[in-house]
Image: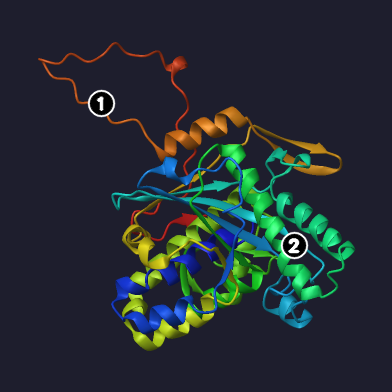
């Protein structure tokens, strides 16, 4: 689950917060002009966003690709030295982060649910696969089909084939969790770097010092600020962490908290010059669904910028090696139950009084485990492993 939840959330927040900042229509137009839009969600079967009522579900897709929007390889030296990400052949088109962002219609606290990238689930059209593979499998098949149809321009084929990758990912998540998806945003590896660079040094906190040659993460313990290259290393590290990819998911969540804190405390959203730079650094590598309107989203997204967001990570039952790949074994019914409980928690019971006796106690063995909680924010910078 690479960095991309952070990328998508930051990029979306940067665009959707423009009206809140009060800098006017010109900056809004500058932000939205040039954004790449997609029809993938509109063509998704069995998806009915109206069931969400006034609430909004946004799937943030992080694409682990070392290529630009037209499929061209990023400069090798940049990938190696700045992104610490191997070369352009590494990662393919895996969606190494999938994060479902829930924005309540009443403007209350947002909720973000991370789906571990190696969860072994049904991918429509491909059977049991890691959920991160849904994008790349569909993209590759679409690319081959387009070539056979006579589409020889690589850039055109790339853009059309990625639409199939997005549709496959959206469908896999929607069917897995059985929740309607209103919107989505996708950001690639370069997009994260540009966003982190535009926002500026990001505050994070580590419980222990780390020194990982694979990701380039070499940081002391405690609170510190990271530049764009360091931020990528921070959220990419999984070697040397007790829970591996699950710890990396918590890194992503902590990074999002740091970005939101930076946006709030720095006053970037109220400074026209800095805001223009932020907009320029966020839109070029972001893809959003064609119906996502940043203006209409502002009233709900404000809680994110204020740090009012709770993170959750869906549970894993165990680990196996299947066809030579390490996968997460999950209980699909449990994932759906936990997701439903997170998005629509049961109302709190009133405290017992002399006039209102407490209900009979339920035996502990009959009570479900609480939802899997991610990093805790509450307006601060959470420390993670």
Residue contact at pointers 1 and 2, CB within 8 angstroms: no
Can you say which quadrant of the picture contains the C terminus? bottom right
Going by the picture, which residue comes out furthest to the top?
Answer: 360
- Percent from the top left, x then y, of residue 180? 50, 43
- Percent from the top left, x then y, of residue 370? 45, 31
- Up-down relation of residue 232 to residue 137 (above or below): below
- Up-down relation of residue 46 to residue 163 (above or below): above
Q: Mark 2 sits on what residue?
A: 161
- Percent from the top left, x then y, of residue 265? 33, 72
Q: Mark 1 sits on what residue?
A: 349
What crowding class fits label 1: few (fewer than 14 Cα within 10 Å), some (14-19), or many (20 or more)? few
- Percent from the top left, x then y, of residue 374? 48, 46
| Alpha-carbon span between mark 1 and mark 2 | 50 Å
Quick check: 191 left or right of 325?
Answer: left
Q: Residue at 15% of width from left, 16% of height from top?
A: 356
Q: Secondary structure at mark 2?
A: helix
Nearer the observer, 350 or 286 = 286
**In front of the other: label 1 or label 2?**
2
Q: Quadrant of residue 165?
A: bottom right
Quick check: 114 left or right of 270?
Answer: right
Going by the picture, which residue comes out furthest to the bottom?
Answer: 273
Mark 1 and mark 2 lie on one chain; the one further toward the N terminus is 2
Going by the picture, which residue comes out furthest to the right?
Answer: 148
């Amino acid at each position: 689950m690479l960095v991309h939840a952070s990328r998508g959330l930051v990029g979306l927040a940067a665009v959707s917060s423009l009206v809140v900042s009060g800098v006017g229509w010109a900056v809004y137009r500058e932000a939205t002009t040039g954004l790449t839009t997609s029809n993938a969600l509109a063509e998704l079967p069995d998806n009915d966003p109206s069931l969400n009522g006034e609430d909004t579900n946004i799937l943030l897709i992080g694409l682990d690709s070392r290529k630009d929007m037209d499929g061209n390889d990023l400069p090798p030296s940049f990938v190696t030295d700045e992104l610490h990400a191997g070369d352009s052949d590494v990662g393919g088109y895996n969606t190494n982060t999938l994060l479902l962002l829930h924005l309540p219609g009443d403007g209350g606290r947002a909720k973000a649910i991370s789906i571990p990238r190696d969860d072994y689930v049904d991918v429509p059209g491909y059977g049991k696969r890691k959920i991160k593979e849904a994008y790349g499998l569909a993209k590759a098949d679409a690319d081959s089909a387009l070539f056979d149809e006579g589409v020889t321009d690589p850039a055109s084929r790339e853009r059309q084939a990625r639409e199939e990758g997005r549709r496959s990912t959206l469908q896999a998540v929607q069917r897995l969790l059985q929740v309607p998806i209103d919107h989505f945003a996708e950001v690639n590896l370069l997009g994260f770097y540009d966003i982190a660079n535009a926002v500026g040094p990001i505050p994070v906190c580590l419980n222990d010092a780390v020194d990982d040659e694979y990701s380039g993460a070499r940081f002391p313990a405690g609170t510190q600020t990271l530049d764009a290259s360091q931020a990528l290393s921070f959220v990419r590290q999984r070697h040397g962490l007790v829970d591996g990819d699950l710890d990396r998911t918590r890194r992503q969540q902590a990074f999002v908290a740091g970005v939101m804190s930076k946006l709030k405390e720095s006053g970037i959203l109220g400074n026209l010059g800095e805001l223009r730079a932020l907009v320029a650094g966020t839109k070029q590598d972001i893809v959003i669904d064609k119906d996502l309107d940043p203006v209409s989203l502002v009233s709900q997204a404000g809680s994110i910028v204020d740090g009012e967001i709770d993170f959750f990570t869906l549970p894993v039952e165990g680990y196996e090696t299947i066809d030579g790949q390490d996968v997460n074994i999950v209980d699909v019914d449990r994932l759906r139950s936990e997701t439903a409980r997170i998005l629509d928690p049961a109302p709190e019971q009133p405290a017992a009084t002399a006039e209102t006796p407490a209900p009979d106690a339920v035996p502990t063995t009959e009570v479900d485990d609480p939802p899997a909680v991610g990093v805790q924010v509450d307006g601060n910078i959470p420390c993670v492993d």
